[in-house]
Image (cartoon, grey):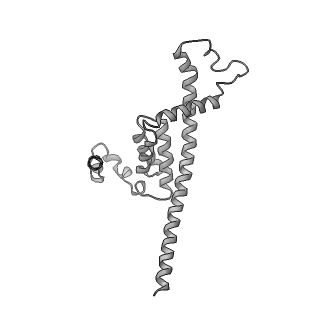
């Protein structure tokens, strides 16, 4: 079953030639197919992770195209950016929105007594769910999503950079040991 899904996915991924021949993408194909956008480097991978997290959280339904298009001007790795958008999936949607709502409440202080007339002062007086949604839940969730995406993007950028450094450090140590071993026994 897994191999069939994998083969199906590989069969539907556009190749470089298909992108070059596509009449809609032909005017920008040179920019989309620039090799720097597809190489895994120490700078482009963390950029792709951060960009994918932001677009995955802020744009829940069109996150992959947004991440791919936004990767062009910032020279982020396109496959990493698109893959990282999968952070926001049906399993993680509820925790993301729940956390965003509570973060937004905390940032906007909608649940505290505010001197003067607070933003959501009439929410308790009205039973209308639409008023509650517009006055309290909507702004709190939007602000929470922005804060959450920014914080997770920074964390993702730092973690991707650290993982990259550790991975490269291990490769260099392995080469050094192999070189020293070869020199010792020559």
The vertical placement of 24 against 35, above or below, is above
Residue toward you, 117 or 95: 95
Q: Residue at x 40, y 50 (%)?
A: 79
Residue at (50%, 85%) from the top-left corner?
184
Number of labels in the image equals 0
Which x, y percent locates residue 45? 47, 54
Residue pictured at 44% horizontal, 35% vertical: 60
Residue lying furthest front: 1
Q: Point out residue 127 in the picture as x, y percentages from the top left corner.
A: 56, 12
Q: Is residue 128 above or below residue 86?
A: above
For the C terminus, the quadrant is bottom left
Residue that protrudes farthest toward the bottom in the picture: 186
Across and down, in percent, residue 150 comes to 56, 41
Residue 71 against residue 90 in the figure, above or below: below
Relative to 140, 49 lies left or right: left
Q: Position of residue 83 (x, y in %)?
A: 42, 47
Name which residue lies at 57% across and 33% down: 144
């Amino acid at each position: 079953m897994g191999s069939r899904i994998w083969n199906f996915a590989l069969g539907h991924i556009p190749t470089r030639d298909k992108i070059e021949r596509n009449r809609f993408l032909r005017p920008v194909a040179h920019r989309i197919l620039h090799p720097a956008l597809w190489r895994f480097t120490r700078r482009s991978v963390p950029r792709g992770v951060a960009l994918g997290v932001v677009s995955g959280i802020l744009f829940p339904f069109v996150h992959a195209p947004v991440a791919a298009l936004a990767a062009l001007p910032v020279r982020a790795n396109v496959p990493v950016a698109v893959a990282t958008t999968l952070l926001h999936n049906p399993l993680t949607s509820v925790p993301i929105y729940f956390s965003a709502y509570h973060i937004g409440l905390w940032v906007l202080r909608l649940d505290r007594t505010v001197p003067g007339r607070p933003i959501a002062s009439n929410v308790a007086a009205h039973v209308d769910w639409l008023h509650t949604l517009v006055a309290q839940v909507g702004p709190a969730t939007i602000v929470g999503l922005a804060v959450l995406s920014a914080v997770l993007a920074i964390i993702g950028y730092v973690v991707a950079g650290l993982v990259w450094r550790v991975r490269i450090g291990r490769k260099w140590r392995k080469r050094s040991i192999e070189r020293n071993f070869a020199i010792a026994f020559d």
